[in-house]
Amino acid sequence: MERLEEQFSDLQVEKRSAMKDNMTYILDIGMSSAVEAPNNQTVAILCSDKSIKLYNKETMTCLQEYNAHPCLLSGVRFSHSNSNLLFSACSDATVKLWDVRVSGAEAVQIFNGYPCNVFISFDISCNDLVLCAGTEKVDDDSFLVFWDARYNSESDSSQPLGVYSESHNDDITQVRFHPTNPGLMATGSTDGLVNVFDIAEDNEDDALRSTCNSDSSVSGLGWAGKDYNQIYCLTHDEGFCWWDLAQVDTDEPITLCKVEDMREKVTSCSIDYLIGGLYHDKTDSMFLVAGSHTGNINLLSCDSDQLTCLKSLQGGHTATVRSFYWCVDDNSLLTGGEDAQLLLWKLKAKDLSPGKRTSMKITSSVQQRVRVHNSKSYSTKQKKTNHV
């Protein structure tokens, strides 16, 4: 822990890349694999103006822009095995596949959902075979929609393999496949539940392996632990839950940590909101990334009995930070926020770029689709069988 704390203490802004429109927010960040092109990685950012922009990580120069989305975007993900392929989900019931080598605004393949679907989350399995997107609740239905994710050059559209429809009863805000097991998938919802599925099973009822209750509305989740047998989630009211799934069938408690409001729990630094979580597999450590509305970023270490502020990154952003990406290969950090800036933080780096931009925004111009979750009890719906 001491070594990692020392690394965090040396993080400084190395490069900045500002959006042309200073009212554009950076909502999500994805990065291509370092295995194929370690010195030429591509960064994809999702912007509030319904566009996706591609940057070279080392130079932070803009390479390309896709703006063919008619509706709101909900994420960007690179293929695990092909750094040229990029996925994005949209609220118009589509997930689009882009080939970053191809110029122009057209996607090379479109994965179509059903007409009523509004996708607000998605992910792709670690072997790049299965794509899954989560929907907003429409009437009484919330869906997890599945596709064969393999690129088919002979077809520019793909239809779903099937759906799960009974495991959540509200908006499905998060979908995260297991980092090493392509059959395992976790989902989170505003119904407060975090579900873990084995999608190799024939139907939804058998696929549902475990359910954890956050008692709040789930805003983010991820996998943790040496064998990635733990799962954590963040909530829309700045809470944090961490469970050990290896204890599900034992007499040991599965809850490793549960904090209702991180703003009240951590007093060593100023926290206005949580940005995301990170499991650092090289040190077997769990971290949270939190922020302040003035643009400061706080890196917190998480143990079952305490939360410690390791480092406060200041002098970078001037407004709320919406997204981050931790680069495990060189321990660098990418951050983006409401000041229309993409920042690259590196160890003992010098900020050689022009000074930081002063934010002209007072309040957010992007309305967040978050419903306040007040109920502590949830109704259990009878599960139906749906083949995938």
Image (cartoon, helix red, strand yellow):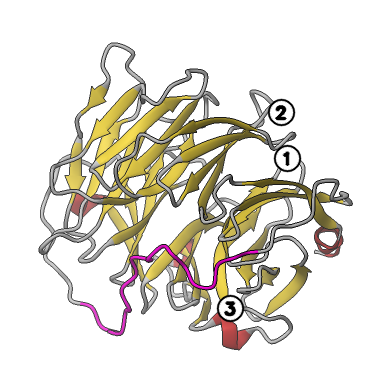
Q: Is residue 99 above or below residue 279?
A: above
Q: Is residue 331 above or below residue 298?
A: above
Sequence-first tag of 2 and 1: 2
Kindly report the secondary structure that dominates the magenta region of the rendered protein: loop
Instruction: Judge whether residue 129 can be spotted in this image.
Output: no
Residue matched to label 3: 272
Where in the figure is residue 328, as x and y percent of width and height? 70, 45
Kindly identify the amino acid type of the residue bearing the numbered disc 1.
Answer: Asp
Tell me the magenta residue range. Answer: 359-378
Instruction: Judge whether residue 331 can be spotted in this image.
Output: yes
Where in the figure is residue 69, as x and y percent of width and height? 34, 39
Kindly identify the amino acid type of the residue bearing the numbered disc 3.
Answer: Asp
Kindly identify the amino acid type of the residue bearing the numbered disc 2.
Answer: Pro
Where in the figure is residue 161, as x and y percent of width and height? 20, 34
Residue matched to label 2: 38
Quadrant of the image occupied by residue 361: bottom right
Q: Residue at x 70, y 58 (%)?
A: 357
Q: Quadrant of the N terminus?
A: bottom right
Q: Nearer the viewer, mark 3 or mark 2?
A: 3
Choose between 99 and 159: the one closer to the eye: 99
Does residue 371 show up magenta in the picture? yes
Where in the figure is residue 55, as x and y percent of width and height? 62, 35
CB within 8 Å, label 2 to label 1 = yes
Q: How busy is the neighbourhood of tag 1: few (under 14 within 10 Å), some, or many (20 plus)? A: few
State the mark number for residue 329: 1
Q: Residue at x 60, y 32 (%)?
A: 33
